[in-house]
Image (cartoon, rainbow, N blue to C red):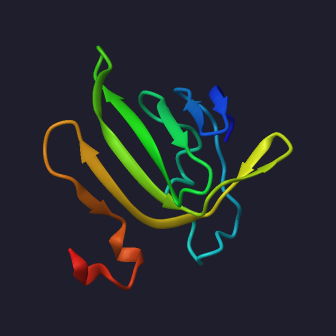
């Protein structure tokens, strides 16, 4: 999906996904079923700030909510460390994620895709 580059430095790459950004997924999806977001076609709600650090196996996503864009929380997306390819980034989602709301306890997400779901 196209993103806005907010900051590109050796220690961090900060990208912003704008509201309404269009995206698509390969068909067939490599894991058998269609990607869970394939029916959407575009980013819904406020945009998201995505922070990448070289060699980290995750990204940190900042989310906002409501008309006043109050900070909603952090989403840690486990993925293969990114690789730069011309004007694109290449990575692979590892399915398991963690949601850390601005108020409240963190929780695992998407464990139904993994075999260690009994850890929760």
> What quarter of the picture does the C terminus occupy?
bottom left
> What quarter of the picture does the N terminus occupy?
top right
Extreme-top residue of the structure = 68
Q: How many marks?
A: 0
The location of residue 59, given as percent across then percent down, is 50, 49
The location of residue 39, given as percent across then percent down, is 54, 52
Extreme-front residue of the structure = 11
Q: Is residue 116 left or right of residue 85?
A: left
The location of residue 40, given as percent across then percent down, is 53, 46
- Front position in the image: 78 or 9: 9
- Front position in the image: 65 or 34: 65
Extreme-left residue of the structure = 104
Q: Is residue 112 above or below residue 40?
A: below
Residue at 54%, 56% (x, y): give it: 56
Residue at 45%, 55% (x, y): give it: 77
Q: Is residue 73 left or right of residue 105?
A: right
- Front position in the image: 113 or 44: 113
Residue at 34%, 28% (x, y): give it: 64
The location of residue 88, given as percent across then percent down, is 77, 44
Extreme-right residue of the structure = 86
Q: Is residue 5 above or below residue 69?
A: below
């Amino acid at each position: 999906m196209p993103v806005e580059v907010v900051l590109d430095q050796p220690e961090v790459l900060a990208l912003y996904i704008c509201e309404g950004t269009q995206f698509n997924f390969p068909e067939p999806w490599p894991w058998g079923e269609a990607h869970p977001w394939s029916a959407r076609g575009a980013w819904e709600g406020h945009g998201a700030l995505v922070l990448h650090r070289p060699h980290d196996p995750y990204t940190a996503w900042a989310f906002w909510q409501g008309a006043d864009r109050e900070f909603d929380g952090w989403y840690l997306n486990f993925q293969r460390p990114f690789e730069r390819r011309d004007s694109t980034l290449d990575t692979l989602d590892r399915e398991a994620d963690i949601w850390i709301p601005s108020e409240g306890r963190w929780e695992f997400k998407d464990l139904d895709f993994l075999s260690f779901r009994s850890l929760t």
